[in-house]
Amino acid sequence: MVQPSCRIVGWGKCVPDKVVTNHDLARTLNTSDEWIRERTGIRERRIAAVTDSTSTLAVSAARVALGVAGLPPEELDLIIVGTVTPDYPLPSTACLVQDALGASSAAAFDLVAGCSGFVYGLTIASQMIQAGSCRNVLVVGSDIMSRVTDGTDRNSRILFGDGAGAFVLQGSDEPGGVLSSWLGSDGSGSKLLTIPAGGSRCPASPATVREGLHYIQMSGREVFRFATQILRRAVAEAVARAGLGIADIDLVIPHQANVRIIQSAARALDLPLEKFFVNIAKYGNTSAA
């Protein structure tokens, strides 16, 4: 039996209507448009409305992706939602998406891997399709980072935006599709980027709210140093596992965390920056989205 390939047949996004520019942030933070652009490449970001939630953004992006694929939601076998800002601890956001779409035959689960969530979901989906467990899989990255960011913290507030992105993946008898992946982790750096409270180790309480422990805490310099190294390595590993060389690559679509991280990776890989897709100026860092 020939192992099926996994193809991306549908794609969609959803971003909130509200745009917050660097100039807007400069009114309340000790910063400026020039300072933010020089250090991050960000000019503006989208911020969710009160009526938005992670699941509503995810559903909107998913419907666009299903429309592109021409696939009824009833034919989905699995829904994976990558997020660090779920609607609730329980039930999973993926189950809320499944219900809203009417995907009556789909299993559903959330995946918590931060900014890597979409790539983790893509890898799991492709492996399940190639193993023959699923035919059609929806992968969504959706995060409302503005809800977990301290509005008075210049270092984190300037970086993050809200949004959702979705892929429909489908098994195919034709060769091609997702050729390779490379995943990794380093839990030793867990304190460098964390939301300390709200879990079983530090449950929510009046004290955790007063101390701002439900907001992102980040050691920006250390995270930047790690990211510059790991992006270069991830690209090289994925390319090698696909049986290709760096010179074969026409386009790299990296996570949009900081334009300087992307520039550093381009130099290390000896690729022109024109080969890297960059839209961080419009959206900021939308985590799994």
Image (cartoon, rainbow, N blue to C red):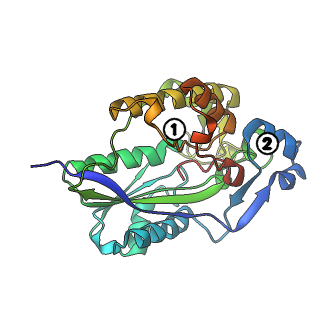
Task: Give the camera-side residue of 247 and 259.
Answer: 247
Work out whether residue 103 can be spotted.
no
Q: Residue at x 63, y 37 (%)?
A: 273
Q: Who comes first in sequence, dot 1 or dot 2? A: 2
Residue 17 on image: x %, y %:
69, 68
Dot 1 and dot 2 residues touching (CB under 8 Å):
no
Residue type at numbered disc 2? Arg
SS at mark 1? Answer: loop
Depicted 286 relative to depicted 211: above or below: below
Counting every numbered tag in the picture gives 2
Callout 2: few (<14), some (14-19), or many (20+) C-alpha neighbours within 10 Å?
Answer: some
Does residue 61 lie above or below 268 as drawn? below
Nearest-to-viewer mark from 1 and 2: 2
Instruction: Describe residue 240's horizontal placement relative to residue 283 as left or right.
Output: left
Q: Residue at x 87, y 53 (%)?
A: 23
The residue under the point 23% across, 54% down is: 174
| Residue type (three-letter) at the residue carrying disc 1 | Arg
Between residue 47 and residue 236, name the one nearer to us.
236
Asked if 48 appears above or below 3 in the picture, the reply is: below
* Left or right: residue 62 compared with residue 221: left
* Measured Cα–Cα span from mark 1 to mark 2: 37 Å
Label 1 neighbourhood size at 10 Å, few (<14), some (14-19), many (20+)?
few
**Residue 201, labelled with which disc?**
1
Image coordinates of residue 69 in percent, x first then y, are 38, 68
Q: Is residue 267 left or right of residue 123?
A: right
Q: Percent position (x, y) of residue 217?
A: 67, 37
Label disc, if present, on residue 37 of the rendered structure: 2
Residue 120 locus on image (x, y percent):
41, 44
Q: Residue furthest left?
A: 1
